[in-house]
Image (spheres, rainbow, N blue to C red):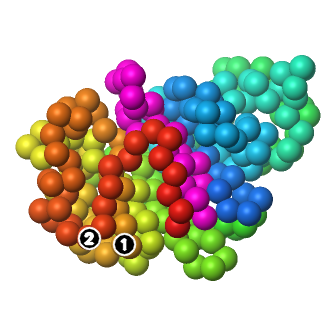
Amino acid sequence: MELTILGSGTSVPSLTRGSAGYLVRHGKSLLLLDSGPGTLQRVLWSGATLEEITHVLYSHTHVDHTADLAPLLFTSRNPSSPRRAPLTIGGSREFLEFFQEISVLYGSWIGAATYERTVIELDGERREMGDLSVTARRVPHIPSSIALRIEDPAGRSMVYSGDTGESGDLADFAAGVDLLLIEASFPDGQEVEGHLTPASAGRVASKARPGKVILTHFYPPCDAVDMLSQLRAAWPGEAALAEDGMRIRI
């Protein structure tokens, strides 16, 4: 299983960090986790194609995580290169309501005339997605927010926290994973409700005890401080900061 960081930033424009977007590949399955603005171009930069994506899964409905959903569906119906491969889109119940609203707004312009499209609710039940399995867990951010646990047939696993505040449920959900991809939106001392700092992410990790922690979803103040040192005050294990274009074998 391989994780590619497409966007390690937020809604604030940056020359080095795009908005949230991550690819997880194993076998014939290619999962896109969130698609903030600019994600589609970064998929191509990664060497993948949009047609290869088998599943698009959303952690929540904020714009910096969903803005490229409509463009993805719009380009999939382009007469010059229509999509043929099946596509599954998934998220929480609130995300499905959001998806219905944009479907009404854009109508046939984001329809699936040339390919099979399935929309599923991720509600805690383990779901098989080709060569991978995915389970969701609610996290404290906004009502639509979920974390995602992804596992391959050999038992290798990762959790993507999405945007979240500190949560014992998240720590339980991520217990023993090989990789915890967890947001740390602001440095310690600049806490914002519904988000983590390195210290609070470290407290989650110290309970979950993953094989490795990768911090992501950085607002600009994060680039001015030593985020890893702040993390290590609570989590002494293996850790790294996400960078756009980074690839991690799990």
Element at label 1: loop
Residue 140 is situated, as x and y percent measured from the top left of the image, at 33, 52
State the separation of the CA atoms marked 1 and 2: 8 Å
Question: Tag 2: residue type?
Answer: Gly
In-image side of 208 versus 138 (left or right): left
- Residue 237, located in which quarter of the rendered image? bottom left
- Front-most of residues 59 and 3: 3
Relative to 83, residue 201 above or below:
below
- Front-most of residues 204 and 30: 30
Identify the magenta region.
Answer: 1-24
> Which residue does the numbered mark 1 point to in the structure image?
210
- Front-most of residues 189 and 60: 189
Q: Disc number at residue 89?
A: none
Question: Tag 1: residue type?
Answer: Pro
Q: Is residue 135 visible?
A: no
Residue 139 is situated, as x and y percent measured from the top left of the image, at 37, 56
Q: Is residue 1 visible?
A: yes
> Which residue does the numbered mark 2 point to in the structure image?
237
Few, some or many C-alpha atoms within 10 Å of disc 1 (few <14, some 14-19, many ≥20)? many
Instruction: Kindly check if marks 1 and 2 are in contact, taking CB atoms under 8 A apart as contact.
Output: yes
